[in-house]
Image: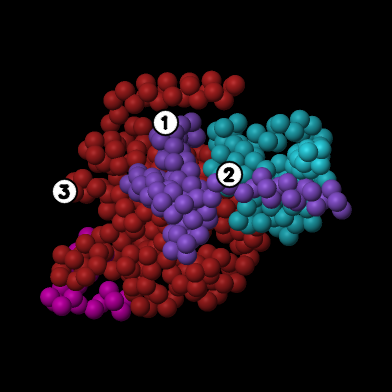
Chain colours: A red, B purple, C cyan
């Protein structure tokens, strides 16, 4: 009975809020939401430092942390970094390089992705930007979930280690709409299991699911790409998101689906201020 | 022991479909399920068990097991409809979950 | 004629739903532990189970906590309806479990 009342109240509030004009940046609805989102996790995990949130389960569980420290003596993503550097330095058939596509030659910029691209009116992830670079230079796009793409993402992430997420929502209603769509995706129940990202990665963060610890949503993308033992290989953020879709018995969307890109946009913005720690490792 | 035998017999009788499915019925059920799933996929709301039920229905149909095919297709139809229902409901109720 | 009626009555009586007995509790336990069905251990600790999951409350003292069986039915059918932010799947509503499977799982839960 009470839940129905709260639901109605929430719907009315949402309607009123939706009708109120919302600027797209600074001291606005997204910023207020980010502050509230982060306050939730800082209160829930008072002993976890900001720079640790990108380490997911290892940040919130002592036992897992010890295992992680042992693994990190020989980081399992080292091979991917070597491959990534080799690929990054190799010229395209037309003589250009990856570095030519990016600000600052692609160094120390990973924390600004995903970006809203005015020309397309859509969100572009790091992997999307890498593929656009390739295609614009006459190369075929890479499979975005693993392999060479993950290696390149690893290189770019490593060059941004310690830099806090700095996602911008430009003063463009389409950008705000993309953020809102990402937020909706994050909180919507999906799949036959009927759970949302929030269902598991907000209140239950830090709790145990069989042998796993649920990572907090805050900073969850700061550790990407990851070498995940369960895969026995590297995976980009979209690989992990896609796997999660399957785990909730939802049919995964296409890797470059707008919904997934909007989700990454929202989640990364929520993590503004949280430093990049990727590439990472997971159980 | 006798009671158990009667029980088993009774349940067996009750479990049989009233009338066995025909090939046409099984095919119609599969077509309906596939249409519903196409809608779910277009809505980006599809579930993996729906796909599994469709595959099972197709397999049974190919093997000439009309009852099994219809049962699997009916289940796929139910799941596909539920998946769209959930997505539609969530379009408004997601806001109730937003952390404030 | 009498024999037919007798046979019919025996079949009809035999087909009546039974109250919980040892068979249903075991079936309920199997369903609860089956990863493709209840998969309860994914989120709940159950005595005798092999997973210390903590997403949900430990499944113990069920009779004391849920004296009203109808509450358990509601929880297993559609917990998100009762609690908008519940991490628990709507097992019955989304056809993860049938009503009959839910009843058996409840029979098992009442032994915890």
State whether discs 3 and 2 lie on one chain. Answer: no
Is B78 included in the stretch rendered in magenta? no
Query: Is residue B43 visible in this depiction of the protein?
Result: yes
Mark 2 falls within which chain? B
| Category of crowding for the residue at label 3, using alpha-carbon neighbours closer than 10 angstroms: few (below 14), some (14–19), many (at least 20) | few
SS at circle 1? helix
- The residues colored magenta run A85-106
| Category of crowding for the residue at label 1, using alpha-carbon neighbours closer than 10 angstroms: few (below 14), some (14–19), many (at least 20) | some
Is A92 included in the stretch rendered in magenta? yes
SS at circle 3? loop
Question: A90 or C42, which lies in front?
Answer: C42
Q: Residue B92 carries which label?
A: 1
Question: A54 or A209, which lies in front?
Answer: A209
Q: Distance between the residues labelled 3 and 1?
A: 31 Å
Residue at 42% x, 78% y is A79
Query: Is residue A164 visible in this depiction of the protein?
Result: no
Q: Name the residue under label 3.
A: A119
| Category of crowding for the residue at label 2, using alpha-carbon neighbours closer than 10 angstroms: few (below 14), some (14–19), many (at least 20) | few
Q: Distance between the residues labelled 3 and 2?
A: 61 Å
Residue A114 screen position, x and y as percent: 31, 52
Residue B95 screen position, x and y as percent: 44, 32
Quarter residue A30 falls in: top left
Asked if residue A29 is positioned above or below residue A231 in the image, the reply reads: above
Asked if residue A141 is positioned above or below residue B51 in the image, the reply reads: below
Mark 1 falls within which chain? B
Residue at 39% x, 58% y is A238
Residue at 15% x, 69% y is A137
């Amino acid at each position: 009975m009470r839940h129905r009342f709260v639901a109605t109240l929430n719907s009315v509030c949402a309607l009123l809020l939706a009708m109120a004009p919302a600027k797209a940046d600074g001291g606005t609805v997204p910023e207020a939401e980010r502050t509230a989102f982060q306050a939730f996790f800082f209160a829930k995990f008072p002993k976890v430092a900001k720079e640790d949130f990108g380490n997911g389960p290892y940040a919130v569980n002592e036992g897992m942390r010890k295992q992680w420290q042992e693994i990190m003596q020989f980081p399992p993503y080292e091979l991917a970094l070597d491959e990534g550097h080799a690929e990054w330095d190799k010229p395209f058939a037309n003589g250009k390089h990856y570095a030519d596509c990016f600000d600052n030659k692609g160094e120390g910029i990973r924390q600004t992705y995903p970006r809203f691209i005015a020309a397309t009116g859509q969100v572009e992830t790091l992997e999307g930007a890498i593929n656009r670079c390739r295609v614009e230079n006459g190369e075929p796009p890479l499979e975005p979930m693993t392999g060479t793409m993950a290696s390149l993402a690893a290189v770019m992430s490593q060059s941004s280690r310690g830099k806090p997420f700095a996602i911008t929502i430009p003063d463009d209603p389409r950008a705000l709409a993309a953020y809102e769509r990402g937020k909706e995706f994050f909180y919507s129940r999906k799949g036959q299991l009927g759970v949302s990202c929030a269902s598991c990665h907000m209140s239950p963060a830090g709790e145990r699911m069989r042998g796993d610890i649920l990572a907090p949503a805050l900073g969850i993308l700061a550790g990407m790409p990851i070498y995940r033992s369960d895969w026995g290989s590297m995976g980009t953020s979209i690989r992990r998101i896609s796997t999660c879709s399957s785990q909730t018995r939802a049919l995964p969307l296409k890797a470059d689906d707008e919904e997934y890109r909007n989700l990454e946009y929202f989640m990364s913005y929520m993590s503004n201020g949280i430093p990049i720690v990727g590439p990472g490792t997971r159980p | 022991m006798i009671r158990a035998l009667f029980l088993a017999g009774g349940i067996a009788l009750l479990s049989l479909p009233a009338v066995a499915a025909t090939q046409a019925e099984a095919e119609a059920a599969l077509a309906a399920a596939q249409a519903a799933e196409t809608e779910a996929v277009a809505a980006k709301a599809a579930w993996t068990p729906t796909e599994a039920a469709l595959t099972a229905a197709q397999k049974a149909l190919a093997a000439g097991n009309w009852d099994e095919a219809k049962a699997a297709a009916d289940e796929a139809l139910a799941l596909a409809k539920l998946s769209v229902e959930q997505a539609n409901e969530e379009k408004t109720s997601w806001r109730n979950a937003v952390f404030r | 004629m009498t024999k037919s009626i007798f046979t019919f009555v025996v079949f009809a009586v035999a087909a009546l739903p039974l109250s919980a007995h040892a068979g249903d509790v075991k079936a309920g336990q199997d369903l609860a532990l089956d990863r493709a069905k209840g998969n309860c251990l994914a989120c709940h600790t159950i005595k005798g189970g092999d997973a210390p999951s903590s997403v949900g409350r430990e499944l113990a003292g069920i009779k004391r906590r849920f004296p009203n069986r109808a509450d358990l039915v509601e929880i297993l059918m559609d917990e998100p309806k009762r609690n908008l932010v519940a991490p628990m799947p709507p097992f019955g509503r989304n056809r993860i479990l049938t009503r009959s499977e839910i009843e058996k799982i409840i029979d098992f839960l009442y032994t915890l």
